[in-house]
Structure formats: C-alpha cells, structure tokens
Image (cartoon, coloured by chain):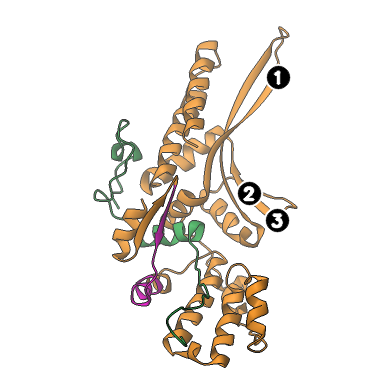
Chain colours: A orange, B green
C-alpha cells in the first residue's frame, strides 16, 4: 500500500525494517510535491498544524535562513514546536548560541470551529479508517438458564483519536448517522459502532463504494464474515463454533 | 478508484501481497490516510563536512 502511495505521489522511497514499512520523502524538491498535495487536499486533523510548521521551516531553509545564527535559532525554535520538543541535551547546546526566539504561530484561524469543514469526504473517511480504524470484538460470558456458561460475541468497529481531534470523530458519526463517541479521561476519544444492524446498513455500503486498502482491508473482510454469521444465523452451537473460528482468523490478522 | 468492486475482488486468499499496479488512490483518501498515519519530521544534526548550513 505504501508503494501505491509512492506511485500516487511519484516521489519518495519505501523502506522495510522487520514488520514495519515506511514511505519517506526527504529531498526538498520532492517535498514540494507533497506540500502541493496537502495544500490542495488539506489535512483535517491537528496534524495540519504540524504541516504548517513544517512548511514554514522549509521556507526558511530555502531562503538560506539557517546559514546565520539568528536564522538558525529561529529554525530550531520552529523545529522545537514540531511534534516532540527537542532533546534537553540539544537544547542546552543551542542555548550556548543564544536564546531561542519565542515564536507564536497564528493558528486560530484554521482551527476555529467556524472554519472547520462541516462534512467529511467519504474517500477521506476510508483513508483515515485504513490508518486508525480497528475491527474488533467484545466478548461477554454469561450463565444460561441451564446454569452453563455461554460466551456472547459483539462485533465492533472503532476509531480512536486523541481528544484534541474529537471533532473528526463527531463528523464521521454524522456521515454514518450512527455510532457513539466516548471521551475518556486519559485524553483519548473513541467512535464505536457496535449494533449489528447499523454495521450492515451503513458501514458495508460505505466500504464497498470507498474501499479500505492494505492490511486493514483484510482485517475488515475477516471481521465482516464474522458479522454476517452473527447477524444471519440464530444462535446454535454450530453457529458459535463457526463464529469462534472466524474470530480466531480475525485475531490472527492483528 | 474502481468504485464498483467489492474489496474481495482485489485480493486473492492465497496471495496477501497487494500489488501497487492494480489500483490508483483517490487524493482525498491519501489525505485521510495521512491524517491517520502521516508525520512531518525535521532533525538538526551537526555536519562533519560543512562549516555552515
């Protein structure tokens, strides 16, 4: 799938290390292709803010700002704001050159609620779900009328995000007209679809028309088999054995 | 994007390797995936060869 993304952009390289694969674009000329893409099709999460810092840094480098100490410190200050802060040891060395300028980036405009998109494109949702979606299940063991323990499965599709991007989960729920959003005190929010009927009537047509890609699609297809068995057949020991097998298959794809 | 295909058609059960030749991505899909998995990184390092820059 990363190769498909590489092909899409016609730049960058894909590297594989163990179970991880990475698509990376490093050269300034190639990065311009990526920047043009995100200017035309803007990021919707707070990652858009990182993108703006990144563009600002590249701009300064292109203007050769980093070749004098003042410009270099300005760059370091911006890099310090991108993702994680710089390491203490590096900061200590930088401070020997001079204090890092305090840079405030006007961010309020794009992130005020009035300027946010009010609807998400279905292709965007499938791309996002290919990254952050989770096709999983819950189990609950109860004791039936004969006093025997019975395992019930409930199949779940969930998207988790840091709560700063809660609005995206709400917008996705709006698009599907179903799903519940939970906000946890740990700073994580989850959009969860667990009703069998809603899965079939809303998610299935969506992912048919706007497919997931890569490994997530394989997980989805395995999960959907289990959903279908759970929905179409009444509870018998034969069905439960089949469901057990499908759940095992799904787990093996994790 | 080949819209009228179900996901199943694209993958054979024996070969899970996904060919990048068989489909193209929608640009909004790419942005959505980047919102999920992308990252922008920049690092500072000391060059052994250049005095500045």
- The residues tagged by marks 1 and 3 sit, at their Cα atoms, a distance apart of 32 Å
The disc, 1 or 2, on the residue closer to the chain's N-terminal end is 1
The furthest residue to the right = A185
Of the two numbered discs 3 and 2 in the rendering, the one whose residue sits closer to the viewer: 3
The kind of secondary structure element at disc 2 is: strand
Q: Which mark is residue A187?
A: 3
Residue projecting furthest to the front: B48
Q: Is residue A147 above or below residue A31?
A: above
Q: Are marks 3 and 2 on the same chain?
A: yes
Q: Residue at x 48, y 42 (%)?
A: A202
Q: Say if A237 sits above or below A45 in the image.
A: above
Front in this rendered view, residue A20 or A51 = A20
Q: Position of residue A81 (x, y in %)?
A: 61, 75
What is the crowding at mark 3: few (fewer than 14 residues within 10 Å), some, or many (at least 20)? few
Residue A201: x, y in percent?
Answer: 47, 38
Give the residue displayed 31% in from the left and 38% down from the top: B11
Residue occupying the point 65% across, 16% down: A150
Relative to B45, B8 lies left or right: left
The location of residue A251, given as percent across then percent down, is 51, 31
Residue named by callout 2 = A190
Please tell me whether mark 1 or mark 3 is closer to you in this view.
3
Mark 1 burial class by Cα count in 10 Å: few <14, some 14-19, many 20+: few
Distance CA(mark 3)–CA(mark 2) = 10 Å
Chain containing the residue with disc 3: A
| Depicted B6 relative to depicted A60: above or below | above
Residue B30 appears at what percent x and percent y?
Answer: 40, 59
Q: Is residue A145 magenta?
A: no
Residue A21 colored in magenta in the image:
yes
Going 58% across and 86% down the picture, which residue do you hit? A74
Q: Say which residue label 1 marks.
A: A142
User: Magenta region: which residues?
Assistant: A20-36
């Amino acid at each position: 799938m990363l190769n498909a993304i590489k092909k899409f952009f016609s730049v960058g390289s894909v590297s594989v290390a163990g179970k991880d694969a990475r698509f990376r674009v490093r050269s300034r000329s190639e990065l311009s292709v990526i920047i043009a893409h995100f200017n035309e099709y803007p990021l919707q999460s707070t990652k858009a803010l990182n993108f703006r810092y990144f563009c600002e840094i590249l701009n300064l480098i292109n203007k050769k700002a980093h070749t004098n100490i003042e410009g270099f410190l300005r760059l370091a200050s911006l890099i310090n704001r991108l993702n994680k802060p710089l390491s203490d040891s590096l900061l200590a060395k930088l401070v020997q050159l001079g204090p890092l300028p305090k840079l405030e980036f006007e961010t309020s405009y794009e992130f005020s609620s009035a300027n946010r998109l009010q609807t998400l494109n279905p292709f965007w949702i499938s791309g996002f779900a290919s990254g952050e979606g989770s096709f999983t299940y819950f189990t609950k063991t109860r004791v039936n009328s004969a006093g025997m323990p019975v395992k019930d499965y409930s199949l779940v599709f969930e998207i988790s995000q840091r709560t700063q991007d809660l609005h995206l989960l709400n917008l996705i729920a709006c698009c599907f007209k179903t799903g519940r959003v939970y906000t946890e005190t740990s700073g994580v929010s989850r959009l969860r679809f667990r009703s069998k009927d809603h899965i079939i009537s809303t998610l299935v047509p969506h992912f048919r028309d706007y497919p997931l890609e890569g490994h997530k699609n394989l997980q989805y297809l395995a999960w959907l088999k289990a959903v279908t068995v759970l929905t179409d057949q009444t509870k018998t020991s034969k069905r439960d054995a089949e469901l057990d097998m499908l759940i095992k298959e799904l787990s093996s794809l994790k | 994007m080949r819209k009228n295909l179900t996901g199943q058609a694209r993958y054979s059960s024996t070969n899970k390797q996904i060919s990048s030749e068989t489909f193209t991505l929608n640009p909004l899909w790419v942005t959505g995936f980047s919102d999920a998995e992308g990252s922008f990184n920049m690092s500072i390092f000391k060059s052994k060869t250049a005095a500045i820059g």
